[in-house]
Amino acid sequence: MDHFFSANGWLNQTISSLNTVLWSYILIVALIACALYFTFKTRGVQFRMFFEMIRLLGDSTKKEHEKHVSSFEAFAVSIASRVGTGNLAGVATAIAVGGPGAVFWMWVIALLGSATAFVESTLAQLYKRKTQGSFIGGPAYYMKFGLRKPRMAKLYAVLITVTFCMAYISIQSNTICAAADKAFGVPPLVMGLILVVLSTLCVFGGIGRIAKVSSVIVPVMAILYVVLALVIILMNLRLIPHVFAVILSNAFGLQQFAGGTLGATMMNGIKRGLFSNEAGEGSAACAASIASVSHPVKQGLVQALSVFTDTLLICSFTAFIILISGVFTTPGLNGVQLTQMALQSEIGPIGTQFVAIAIFFFAFSSIIGNYTYGEMNVKFLTARKGWLTFVRVMNGVVMVFFGSLASLDLVWSLGDLFMGSITLCNLVAIVKLSPQACFLLNDYRQQKRNGIKSPVFHRSQMPDIEKDIEAW
């Protein structure tokens, strides 16, 4: 068992080789090219409509007696999945493997990728379906009803269920156990069993309960972490110019280029940035589809804002703490333990314990948030409740326990492989459907120019695809 889960085991080596082929050329080029394309097609929607994004967080067409999820609750569900180990452990891994310059490429993929998040989330709203008093949707739905490619839709539904309910769950569980072991000496086996119990209770509660839990926990935990990070940054304000200099010099440095590590810097920054903010995977589009709004663009803008919240805010704070501390140069430190050591160097031993507690809330909210995407796509594939129960058991029991025992390298390699697979599949779909998202954006802006404070969309405005649009 130890050899099977070891960092140098045959399984990890095989998955790492597949990741090298997938990520070295294909996915990085595709991600950047699509992000640039969507930024151009929407005329920089993520920049010129930033304040509208913030305003829309308080906008809701949900009535008290309705079962629909509000715009903010859908935002919180997507943040629950985004804000997790990617922010504390993922950033640390990117810096440890790719150097400080990886942070710059995380910023790039967030700034440009927010346009991708806008497109996929707007399309998810457009093609969402009504189900038992609420909404459901995501890439599988716009592939089936928008592209009219049911086989592609089924492939994506299977891939995203495996990715989020299995691969990503193991990463979250692994990180929680590693942090608890270092801070409190809790054995991974014991922590794994505790997580199994807690996650099982949550995932069997369904999407509605997850939305309500996330809308309370996520803002609180994010604020606490941001406050602590701001305190540390303000205490070391004189070092911030140096931190930016280190990031930029490593992102474009001649030393990295000559040493052949520039590619590794870009790759790790983009991979960890994508894992953290999910722009392009299509996963957050699933969360966007469940919101009750009067126009698809509203939730597209809100989801674009969540990319900024995740990467440019929380991930950046983690990176600053690590770079200010200087512990990233210590050999052997990686993942969440690097973040723990960085905080310990700034605020003492309590820093290690704080990260362990924070990572529990961040990662556990991701575990239950990730399950949401699996449930949606299982319902897309089949109406048989037995399959939903199977996914719940795999999510809440099997993969949570597997992650607590597996090695750090193995769980991240597994996550990268499936992340790349669903991203490529989704990018193909949203590129083809992007003219519809652009039409909706222009309609929204025109209504705003005409003095309509809360734009409304009806499917009759798109007669060519009216029969494919159910919820509008």
Image (tube, rainbow, N blue to C red):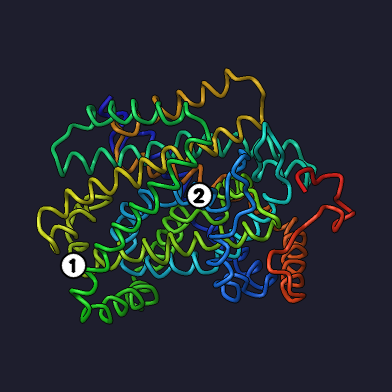
Q: Amino acid at mark 1?
A: Gly
In what element is the residue under mark 2? Answer: helix
Residue furthest toward the right?
463
Compared across the picture, whether 383 is left or right of 69 comes to: right
Q: Is residue 95 above or below residue 252?
A: above
Give the alpha-carbon distance from disc 2 to disc 1, as whole Å. Answer: 32 Å
Residue furthest toward the front?
64
Residue 326, label in figure: 1
Q: What is the x, y in percent for residue 226? A: 31, 62
Q: What is the x, y in percent for residue 57? A: 54, 60
Q: Amino acid at mark 2?
A: Ser
Q: What is the x, y in percent for residue 155? A: 65, 36
Q: Nearer the viewer, residue 312 or 29?
A: 312
Compared across the picture, whether 44 is left or right of 92 comes to: right
Where, by quadrant of the figure, is residue 177 drawn? top left
Residue beneath label 2, please? 78
Contact check, label 2 and label 1, Cβ < 8 Å: no
Q: Looking at the image, is mark 2 or mark 1 earlier in the sequence?
A: 2
In what element is the residue under mark 1? Answer: loop
Q: Is residue 383 above or below residue 229?
A: above
Compared across the picture, whether 239 is left or right of 50 comes to: left
What residue is shown at x 39% (from left), y 25% (from top)? 397
What residue is shown at x 37% (from left), y 65% (from top)? 102
Discs 2/1, front: 2
